[in-house]
Image (tube, helix red, strand yellow):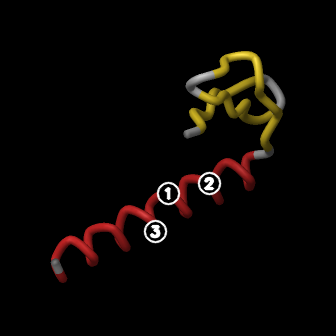
Amino acid sequence: MLKALPTHDGFRAVREYDYYSHYILTIDEYNQIIEENRAMKEEIAKLRKII
């Protein structure tokens, strides 16, 4: 799982289990991750309703 942290030139994604493996994200890349996470949560909610 990635956590995104704001930096002076975008966002830095930090893996929760390894604080030092990170890379710089642009705002667009950060927004894409947020959108993918939201879509994934919606899919999970749909699957829970089916079960």
Identify whether 38 is placed above or below 43. Answer: above
Amino acid tagged 1: Asn
Quadrant of residue 2 within the rendered picture: top right
Residue denoted by label 3 = 39
Identify whether 16 is placed above or below 47. Answer: above
- Secondary structure of the residue carrying numbered label 3: helix
Q: Are marks 1 and 2 in contact (CB under 8 Å)?
A: yes
- Secondary structure of the residue carrying numbered label 2: helix
Residue denoted by label 1 = 37
Relative to the observer, which residue lies in front, 5 or 15?
15
Q: Residue, x 75% and y 17% (percent of image)?
A: 20
The answer to whether 35 appears left or right of 19 in the picture is left
Few, some or many C-alpha atoms within 10 Å of disc 2 (few <14, some 14-19, many ≥20)? some
Amino acid tagged 2: Ile
The answer to whether 10 appears left or right of 35 in the picture is right
Q: Residue furthest top?
A: 20
The percent coordinates of residue 32 (x first, y second) are 65, 59
Residue denoted by label 2 = 33
Please give the count of numbered marks on the rendered protein.
3
Few, some or many C-alpha atoms within 10 Å of disc 3 (few <14, some 14-19, many ≥20)? few
The quarter of the picture where the C terminus appears is: bottom left
Q: Are marks 3 and 1 in contact (CB under 8 Å)?
A: yes
